[in-house]
Image (cartoon, rainbow, N blue to C red):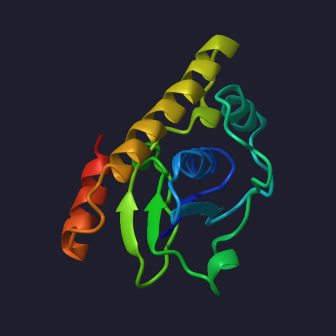
């Protein structure tokens, strides 16, 4: 099962989600990420936060959603934060869709400690959601139930 995490710039939240998902994923699951307006670089603090958590960062890159047009995902999860007034990207036609909004820690200001705390909290929220995802009974869920579960996880 292939999951696509999408956000606006594909530099922080979607990258954190991709890396953490793949770090925790059992065989048969993988994640990628993309952006509706990718900035072309990964946020350095996102990479540092992942590395500090023992999560591989090699190969992570900021890329456009059309990168996956030939090999579409099974599930698309947007992670932009509607409360911040961002425009969430459009996503692939037949894939299951869910929104797991996250505050963008790279947009915050404050002390180094406050900003790092925001990155750590974002990663912890992603971990909570990814663990809930992997706890789902995949073999018995109907598509409609799966969609409801994805929405529920996004509200965690």
Q: Where in the figure is residue 131, as x and y percent of width and height?
A: 40, 43
Vertical position of residue 98 compared to residue 66: above or below:
above
Q: Residue at x 26, y 66 (%)?
A: 146
Image side of residue 109 versus residue 151, left or right: right
Residue 115 found in image quarter: top right
Q: Where in the figure is residue 52, as x and y percent of width and height?
A: 70, 26
Residue at the limit of the structure toward the bottom, as seen here? 70
Looking at the image, which is closer to me, 4 or 29? 29
Looking at the image, which is closer to me, 58 or 89? 58
Q: Where in the figure is residue 112, as x and y percent of width and height?
A: 69, 15
Residue at the limit of the structure toward the front, as seen here? 27
Vertical position of residue 129 compared to residue 9: above or below:
above
In what quadrant of the picture does the C terminus appear?
A: top left
Residue 99 found in image quarter: bottom left
Looking at the image, which is closer to me, 83 or 67? 67
Vertical position of residue 89 compared to residue 149: above or below:
below
Q: Where in the figure is residue 8, as x and y percent of width and height?
A: 60, 57
Image side of residue 81 versus residue 14, left or right: left
Q: Residue at x 80, y 58 (%)?
A: 40
Q: How many marks?
A: 0
């Amino acid at each position: 099962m292939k999951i696509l995490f999408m956000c606006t710039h594909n530099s922080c939240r979607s990258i954190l989600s991709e890396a953490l998902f793949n770090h925790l994923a059992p065989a048969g699951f993988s994640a990628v990420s993309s952006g509706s307006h990718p900035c072309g670089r990964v946020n350095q603090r996102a990479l540092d936060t992942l590395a500090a958590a023992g999560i591989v960062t090699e190969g992570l890159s900021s890329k456009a959603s059309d990168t996956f047009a030939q090999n579409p995902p099974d599930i698309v999860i947007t992670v932009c934060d509607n409360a911040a007034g961002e425009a969430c990207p459009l996503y692939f036609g037949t894939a299951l869709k869910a929104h797991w909004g996250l505050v963008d820690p790279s947009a915050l200001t404050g002390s180094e400690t406050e900003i790092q705390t925001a990155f750590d909290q974002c990663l912890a929220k992603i971990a909570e959601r990814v663990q809930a995802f992997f706890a789902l009974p995949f073999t018995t869920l109907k598509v409609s139930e799966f969609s409801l579960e994805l929405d529920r996880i996004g509200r965690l």
